[in-house]
Amino acid sequence: MKIADRIRRLGTETAFAVSAEAADFAARGNKVYPFHIGDLNIITPANVMEAAVRAMHDGKTGYCPNAGIARLREILAADVSASRNVKYSMENVAIQTGGKPVIGKFFMALMNPGDEVLYPNPGYPIYESLIEFHGGKAAPYTYVEGSDNFDIDLEMLEKQITPRTKLLVLNDLQNPTGAECSKAEFEKLAELVLKHNLYVLCDEAYFDIRYAGKSTSFASLPRMAERCLILYTFSKKFAMTGWRLGAAIGPKSLIDVITKLNVNDESCPNHFIQYGALEGLTGDQTEARKILDTLKKRRDAAVAILNSIEGVHCFCPNATFYLYPNVTSAMQKRGLTDYDDFRRSVLHETGVSFCTRLHFGRPLDGESNFYIRLAYSGINTTEIKEGLGKFKAFIER
Ligand code: PLP
């Protein structure tokens, strides 16, 4: 069978290979501490589940409108308007089967072959994959260590802009670094967006996974709402990763195109699941709040141990459920210079499984520091302490 040429340009999430290695190690009778998965080991709030089951029994099992049920679009528009300080109505919302589909649809709607797209690297690997798959040119910008978290390397970002640059992907509250833009960073980015006539994908997957302070949307800056498409997801806030429900939120003209892509692709988002999401947004928030409390305890436990390890330095982000410690000195101490050797040695000797910088986009020239990514969404506090205790002993041995 001759597979189409375009498939050669399609990347993947190599983090799934780390999951497979960890599963294989566990199947051989070993204890694994799963820090590699950006998934939750917390169950969806009961009221959300009950609402979806009720909807099924009420017959919401057929197709629904292509952009999702009207009530969810209305409620989500009101919710996002309030939290982002931007005025949206249901016409600005197209429900999707997860947040992820928004990425490809944004490129399909706005990128022509040869157009250049600024994207974060390290970053969620699907951006790089889909820019290239759809015939664009992926132009990376990176993050550098600041005083209390990572900052966007704005100088690099600006240098990457050419007359062919059309789009910017911004994942504020970032996977994998946990970085959060300052007001000044937002303002500089908005200035560049206007100067170079760019459109922006605001990947806000972690907007509500926040332990202190308040999330701000780039779309709320002056003149940005008309240029931004927000990726919204129910996956993280309501521990609904496997349900597959999210939304594209932005200017009506773009939402109309995205809805047309829905028609051609999945027809409509899953029908009864949307009633669960409605309950999530409008019903009792006790369990959703508990999810955040649990995650915060895990973060604090993990950061404390990581920063007690000789040769490891870790910021404590106020949002996301990721940590991105600098392990350069720790690797040197163990005489390791290769990411995969380090990752596998730690897995085999301690059971601690994590992703490395290699899983978040093609490494850039001149990178001299080494980073790993730990997700604390799929592992309990007791296991975090036990696993990272073993990691510490491994490094300091
Ligand atoms: N964007 C980022 C930055 C992510 O980390 C993820 C998932 O991990 C997604 C988007 C997509 O999530 P979902 O499709 O479950 O909404």
Image (cartoon, grey):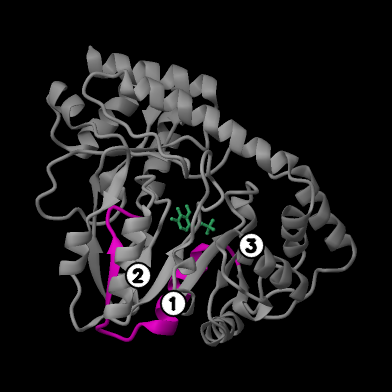
Is residue 98 found inside the magenta-colored segment of the image? Answer: yes
Which quadrant, please, contains the N terminus? bottom left
Q: Position of residue 63 (x, y in %)?
A: 75, 77
Q: Residues within 10 Å of mark 3 (few under 14, many from 20)?
A: few
Question: Which one is nearer the viewer's eye here, 140 or 86?
Answer: 86
Label whose residue precedes the other's in the sequence (1 or 2): 2
Please, what is the three-letter code of the amino acid marked with disc 3? Answer: Ala
Query: Which numbered circle lies on residue 82?
Result: 3
Distance between the alpha carbons at the discs numbered 1 and 2: 8 Å
Residue 239 vs 142, above or below: the answer is above
Could you tell me which residue is drawn at 57 percent across and 84 percent down?
A: 252
Residue 230 vs 179, above or below: the answer is below
Distance between the alpha carbons at the discs numbered 3 and 2: 21 Å
Which quadrant, please, contains the C terminus? top left
Label whose residue precedes the other's in the sequence (3 or 1): 3
Please, what is the three-letter code of the amino acid marked with disc 1? Answer: Arg
Label whose residue precedes the other's in the sequence (3 or 2): 3
Residue that badge 1 annotates: 223
Q: Furthest residue to the right?
A: 58
Query: Is residue 28 visible in this depiction of the protein?
Result: no
Query: Which numbered circle lies on residue 190?
Result: 2
Asked if disc 2 is less than 8 Å from ligand 1, the answer is no
Query: Is residue 78 visible in this depiction of the protein?
Result: yes
